[in-house]
Amino acid sequence: MANRANRPSALNAPSAAAPEAQVDISGTGASSKVTATLPSGESVEVLLYGATVTSWKSSGGKTENLWLSEKAALDGSKAVRGGIPVVFPVFGPPPKSGHATSSLPQHGFARTSRWEFLGKSTSEDAVDASGSSVKLDFGLYSSGLSEEARTAWPLDFGLVYSVTLSKDSLSTVMSVRNEGETSFEFQMLLHTYLKIKDISKVSITGLLGVEYVDKVLNASTHKQSDAAVTITGEVDRVYSSIPQDTTSVLEDGKPRFDVVRDNLSDTVVWNPWTEKAKAMGDFSPDTGFKEMVCVEVGSVNGWQKLDKGEVFEGGQTIKSLL
């Protein structure tokens, strides 16, 4: 008799299939979003405009981990204020002249372009058979850019952004491919707005001894001399070449989030505080800065270069520690 690897067993009745994560697409046009929910209740929502993660709930769906402005534009009229906007191919204001990104707006075009939902992953390593994780893929290509963005950055590329929801974590990883004949340089950042209860009780660890550029202090360079970063006013710092992978957010001395970088060496810590929060028309409520802190992983100190056919991949895993 042939030895068939999958022949039926006469001894054990087949077990019932485990429940699977549910994936739904809702809305129309620029307001379209993809929602994935695990059998245990955890969920993630991704707006196709910008491939922006706008919600991530853990603890059986009871705990929202991302801050989203009450006035965030979710209709494709502008970049989303909150969640996890995707910054590419330039971070901050572009170089004034002489660079391929010089004609682009601040933070580039990825967060203001409509992405394509490529589907729920069916690979065994991405989707746990028990339904305890699910991976969603989104794509943006040069052919899908607006005419304005294509004119400003006429280079051939492909982006695949993977969002993986697990019971206690969320992974967001971006793959950048050069699909043209010409090499190009880029920066990327995941502009994560973490939701906390009280900014006065928050500390951020894992940055001791790291050099940073302080944009509040005229872009001067400093070295982190305290074991923990605390926030008592406007903070806008770019920490570069961080040796360890994990930056931790504590609240009232207790671990709240671990932000684990994957092949990315930089992290931005940002909180607008009182005056800047009031000055931003889409930041609401004005006191919302007390309930959020941005810990943003990226590659923004200098440029990543890709030659024809080359691929760069980097991202993060955020662990909710409640």
Image (cartoon, rainbow, N blue to C red):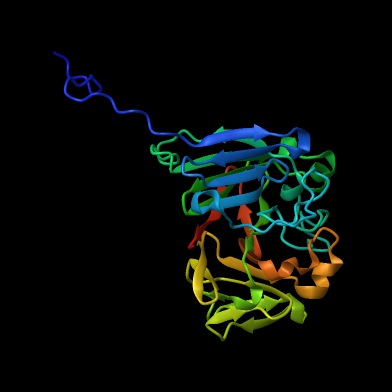
Residue under the image location 28 percent in, 25 percent down: 14
Relative to the observer, which residue lies in front, 83 or 69? 69
Compared to 88, does 219 lie above or below? Answer: below
Relative to the observer, which residue lies in front, 175 or 319? 319
Residue under the image location 59 percent in, 67 percent down: 266
> x and y percent of residue 296 in the render?
62, 63
> x and y percent of residue 126 in the render?
45, 41
Compared to 105, does 126 lie above or below? Answer: above
Extreme-top residue of the structure = 1
Residue under the image location 72 percent in, 69 percent down: 289
> x and y percent of residue 97 in the render?
83, 61
Asked if residue 271 lies left or right of residue 312, the reply is right
- Residue 102 lies in quadrant: bottom right
Extreme-bottom residue of the structure = 225
Which image quarter holds the N terminus?
Answer: top left
Asked if residue 134 lies left or right of residue 12, the reply is right
Relative to the observer, which residue lies in front, 176 or 82? 82
- Residue 227 appears in the rendering: yes
> x and y percent of residue 8 in the render?
23, 19
